[in-house]
Structures are given as structure tokens and as C-alpha cells.
Image (cartoon, coloured by chain):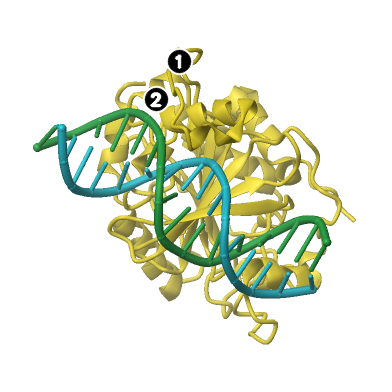
Chain colours: A yellow, B green, C cyan
DNA sequence: CGGATTTGACCCGCGC
DNA sequence: GCGCGGGTCAAATCCG
């Protein structure tokens, strides 16, 4: 897995994404020829487009998460990518070109996903979140005021910090903070190098839940929001979760998304959840059926699938009304 | 008033 | 050792 980092370095989000957009804008049935996200050799992803003609882009695609300055997200192992690739197919192997009434909003989003179940190996390529945060976390457990005293911070009990699994979503949406069913508390915002758009840091508000997520907008395509989840929820989705995405935006959506209720619902999705993601109609896009089939098989039997199920229960076990 | 957000400061790892 | 960039903290502020 050592070369995974290389792949990350070679990642070129812009080109591939623009390419995608061009296709999409010209022809809604964007078959992302030969591997949608053309990032790099190992990259595998899917390009999923819905047949929502006039609604600009009704497409979803899973891919790696690109970030102007944070390549650490990815851990582009083929397995992982395949896993996601097939994750989508697994859930959406329903039927393509099926337009859901009222689904315009959702269909506006394009989402790409990458998984990076990181492990020790993933650590070496920059511990953005590694050392200090772990230390701080430990300090927090003990006592928070230690910080002022600049206490300790010895690397005592953390021989190897194990990174939490990460999954990234690239979503074409105007909404910064996408609804995923969980409740998040923003705890930080930082400017991203080489990007005019800041990165926001969120933490799951559920007690003892360590899940975090980062949200940033692509510097190359401002219409794309990159959401990176870290760790797994160890609790069910909070109650107030909305399932009727297609029925229209909820008030809470406006709040969480910082959008004004007056904006165009059709063209500007108010909210978005992974549940909704898989509910969106799509037109299949992978050009290589053999490959897809193979990946599908691997994925459904792989640990990645299980991981995804845990991280995004709403996606894998969506409850139909 | 309680919870969420904002924002500057701080911490840490890494590269030079 | 220093500067940079990323991540987090926490006081201040906002908001319902």
C-alpha cells in the first residue's frame, strides 16, 4: 500500500472533473468513458448520471476526494475504490433513466466517493491529523486546561496512532454542508492553501461519537463540495432525520445549509443525504461491464462494504416510507 | 438561556 | 531552528 500515496500525488481533480462536466452539460447521459474519474491508474470510480435533462446535472459519481492541499484523505487502494464503485452499483442497481417525481433537487447533486480506511500504513504520508490531535484528545480526556500550561504532550501511550477510516464525497451542489442524517457541530474553519474556499470542520454532536467530517469546496470547481468523513458512527441516526427529501426542503435544511428559503428549489438543492444519494435515479455509466461485475463481486464480499454500511447506514439500509 | 457558530490562537509534524 | 500548513481549542458571539 505504499504506492497509494503516489497515486494521490498524481491525482488531478480538475481535468477529470471538468471533463465530466463538459460531457454532462452537453449530453445528459454522460457515459464517463473508461472510468469516470480519470485521476490515475489505480483510480476507479463510477460516473452516474440521471436522465434529468433540463435539471442541469443529475448525476452522481463516486470517486476520490481531491483537495488542493490535502491529499492525505485518499488512500486510493484499488480495493477501496472498487468498493465504493460497487457500493453505488450495489445500491442503485435498480434501474436507470428512472426519474423520480419531485426529485429535482436531489438530482442536482453529483457525488463522488472515495474511501480510505486508513491504517498504519496511511499514516506515514503526513499526519495531518495524527499526532497532535491524538495528543490533544488524550489531554482532553484528562483535563482541558492542560493546554494553557503547555503540559506534557509526550508521545507516551500512542505508539502507533491508528487513523480512522475516511470516506470522501464529492458532491456537485451549492450547499456547503450536506445533510446526511446526523447532527454536526462545527468546531473550526481554516483557509485551505491554494484555495479561496475555507475548509470547515465538523464533529458529530452525539455523545461519545468521534466521527468528524470536513467540508470544503473545490477550488477548481466551486460547484463541487468535498465532504470527508472520518471514523464511524457508533449510534443510530438521530431522530429528526428527514427522509422525505423529494417532498421539499425542510426548515431545518435552510438552517443547516445556510441557504435562504427563497431560492429556487429545483435548481438549488437545499439538502442532501447519502440516503437521498442512492435514491436518485441514474443512468448507468460504466462502460466496462466485465470490470464492473468483477468489482461488484469483490465489493460485496469485502470489508469495505461492511465498513460503508456502518459508516452510512442510511445509504445501505435506507428505510422506505 | 442553551446550543451552535465564528474566529483568532495554539499545537504539531514536516520540509528546508 | 524556523516557517508553513493543517487541525483543534475555546472564548466570544450569534440565534432561536
Secondary structure of residue under mark 1 = loop
Question: Please, which chain is the residue tagged with disc 1 on?
Answer: A
In percent of width and height, residue A193 lies at: 30, 55
Please say whether residue A284 is visible from this viewpoint. no
Residue A195 is left or right of residue B3, and the answer is left
Q: Nearer the viewer, residue A181 or A300?
A: A181
Q: Mark 2 sits on what residue?
A: A123
Question: Please, which chain is the residue tagged with disc 2 on?
Answer: A
Q: Nearer the viewer, residue A76 or B12?
A: B12
In percent of width and height, residue A166 lies at: 53, 36
Quarter location, residue A22: bottom left
Tell me what residue is drawn at x 40 percent, y 67 percent.
Answer: A21
Secondary structure of residue under mark 2 = helix
Q: Nearer the viewer, residue B14 or A151?
A: A151
Q: Mark 1 sits on what residue?
A: A160
Please say whether residue A149 is visible from this viewpoint. yes
Specify the quadrant that holds the C terminus of chain A: bottom right
- Against A190, residue A250 (above or below) is below
Tell me what residue is drawn at x 57 percent, y 76 percent.
Answer: A53
Specify the quadrant that holds the N terminus of chain A: top left
Amino acid at each position: 500500500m505504499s504506492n497509494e500515496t503516489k497515486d494521490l500525488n498524481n491525482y488531478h481533480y480538475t481535468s477529470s472533473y471538468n471533463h465530466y462536466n463538459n460531457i454532462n452539460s452537453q449530453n445528459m447521459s454522460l457515459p464517463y468513458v473508461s472510468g469516470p474519474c480519470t485521476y490515475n491508474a489505480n483510480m476507479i470510480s463510477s460516473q452516474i448520471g440521471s436522465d434529468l435533462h433540463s435539471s442541469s446535472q443529475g448525476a452522481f459519481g463516486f470517486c476520490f476526494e481531491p483537495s488542493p492541499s490535502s491529499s492525505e484523505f485518499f488512500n486510493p487502494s484499488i480495493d477501496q475504490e472498487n468498493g465504493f464503485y460497487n457500493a453505488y452499483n450495489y445500491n442503485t442497481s435498480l434501474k436507470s433513466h428512472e426519474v423520480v417525481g419531485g426529485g429535482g433537487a436531489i438530482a442536482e447533486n453529483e457525488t463522488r466517493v472515495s474511501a480510505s480506511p486508513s491504517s498504519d500504513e496511511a499514516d506515514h504520508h503526513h499526519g495531518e491529523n495524527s499526532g497532535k490531535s491524538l495528543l490533544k484528545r488524550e489531554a482532553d480526556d484528562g483535563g482541558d486546561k492542560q493546554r494553557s500550561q503547555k503540559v506534557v504532550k509526550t508521545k507516551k501511550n500512542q505508539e502507533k496512532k491508528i487513523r480512522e477510516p475516511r470516506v470522501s464525497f464529492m458532491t456537485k451542489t451549492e450547499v456547503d454542508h450536506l445533510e446526511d442524517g446526523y447532527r454536526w457541530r462545527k468546531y473550526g474553519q481554516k483557509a485551505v492553501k491554494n484555495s479561496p474556499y475555507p475548509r470547515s470542520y465538523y464533529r458529530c454532536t452525539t455523545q461519545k461519537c468521534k466521527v468528524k467530517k470536513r467540508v470544503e469546496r473545490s477550488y477548481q470547481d466551486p460547484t463541487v463540495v468535498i465532504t470527508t468523513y472520518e471514523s464511524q458512527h457508533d449510534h443510530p441516526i438521530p431522530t429528526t432525520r428527514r427522509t422525505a427529501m423529494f417532498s421539499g426542503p425542510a426548515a431545518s435544511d435552510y438552517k443547516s445549509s445556510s441557504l435562504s428559503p427563497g431560492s429556487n428549489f429545483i435548481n438549488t438543492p437545499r439538502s442532501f443525504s447519502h440516503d437521498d444519494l442512492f435514491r436518485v435515479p441514474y443512468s448507468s455509466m460504466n462502460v466496462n461491464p466485465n470490470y464492473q461485475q468483477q468489482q461488484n463481486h469483490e465489493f460485496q464480499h469485502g470489508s469495505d462494504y461492511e465498513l460503508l454500511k456502518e459508516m452510512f447506514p442510511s445509504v445501505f439500509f435506507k428505510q422506505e416510507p
